[in-house]
């Protein structure tokens, strides 16, 4: 698995920002299947700021590992800002990390609906004792491109939450 050089550059920037603020990160991934964790751990020294990652592909995993409420999944679906928020909050509840990011989406080529077309990805960013932010983006491209763009968006959101690029 290889990443766009921009992904690795952003992961390095993230590491510098987390170290500077003495924060540790947890990730909760669905459609990216650990790709964000892979990019983060490609950075030498990431053990100083990356706490752990959850790969919660199924609804059951989201409920069991991240405490995403069944009602949230039943009402809004796995690909929703509400589920993304619950995933990020759950990553903090179940770890000593200070900041968390979640990714849940439809990478394709199947699984899209008129309301949630292929490429729809929802993100959550949460800081312990702070705000939870979410967004929904519809990416273009094939499965690999949707996943890569999702990793970039997750990293950018973390950098934004930490005060921008270093």
Image (cartoon, rainbow, N blue to C red):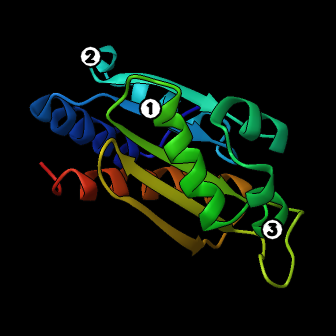
Mark in the foreground, 3 or 1:
3
| Residue under the point 80% across and 68% down | 75
Mark in the foreground, 3 or 2:
3
| Residue under the point 39% across and 45% down | 7
For marks 2 and 1 on the same chain, the one whose residue lies earlier in the sequence:
1
Residue sitting nearer the eye, 106 or 58? 58
For marks 3 and 2 on the same chain, the one whose residue lies earlier in the sequence:
2
Element type where label 3 sits in the image:
helix
Taking the image as shown, residue 5 lies to the left or right of residue 58, namely left
Residue at numbered disc 2: 48
Element type where label 2 sits in the image:
helix
Asked if one can make out residue 63 in the rendered structure from this viewpoint, the answer is: yes
Residue 159: percent from left, percent from top:
26, 52
Taking the image as shown, residue 82 lies to the left or right of residue 157, namely right
Taking the image as shown, residue 83 lies to the left or right of residue 17, namely right
Image quarter of the N terminus? top right
Numbered mark located on residue 75 in the image = 3
| Residue under the point 53% across and 27% down | 94
Residue at numbered disc 1: 26
Classify mark 3: residues with Cα within 10 Å, few (<14), some (14-19) or many (20+): few
């Amino acid at each position: 698995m290889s990443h766009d050089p921009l992904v690795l550059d952003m992961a390095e920037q993230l590491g510098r920002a987390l170290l500077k603020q003495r924060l540790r990160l947890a990730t909760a991934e669905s459609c990216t299947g650990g790709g964000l964790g892979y990019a983060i751990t490609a950075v030498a020294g990431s053990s100083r700021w990356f706490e752990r990652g959850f790969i919660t592909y199924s609804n059951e995993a989201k409920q069991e590992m991240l405490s995403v409420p069944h009602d949230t999944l039943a009402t809004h679906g796995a690909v929703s800002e509400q589920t993304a928020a619950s995933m990020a909050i759950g990553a903090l509840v179940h770890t000593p990390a200070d900041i968390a990011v979640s990714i849940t989406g439809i990478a394709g080529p199947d699984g899209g609906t008129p309301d949630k077309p292929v490429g729809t990805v929802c993100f959550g960013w949460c800081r312990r004792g702070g705000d939870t932010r979410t967004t929904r983006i519809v990416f273009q491209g094939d499965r690999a491109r949707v996943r890569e763009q999702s990793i970039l968006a997750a990293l950018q959101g973390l950098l934004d939450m930490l005060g921008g690029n270093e």
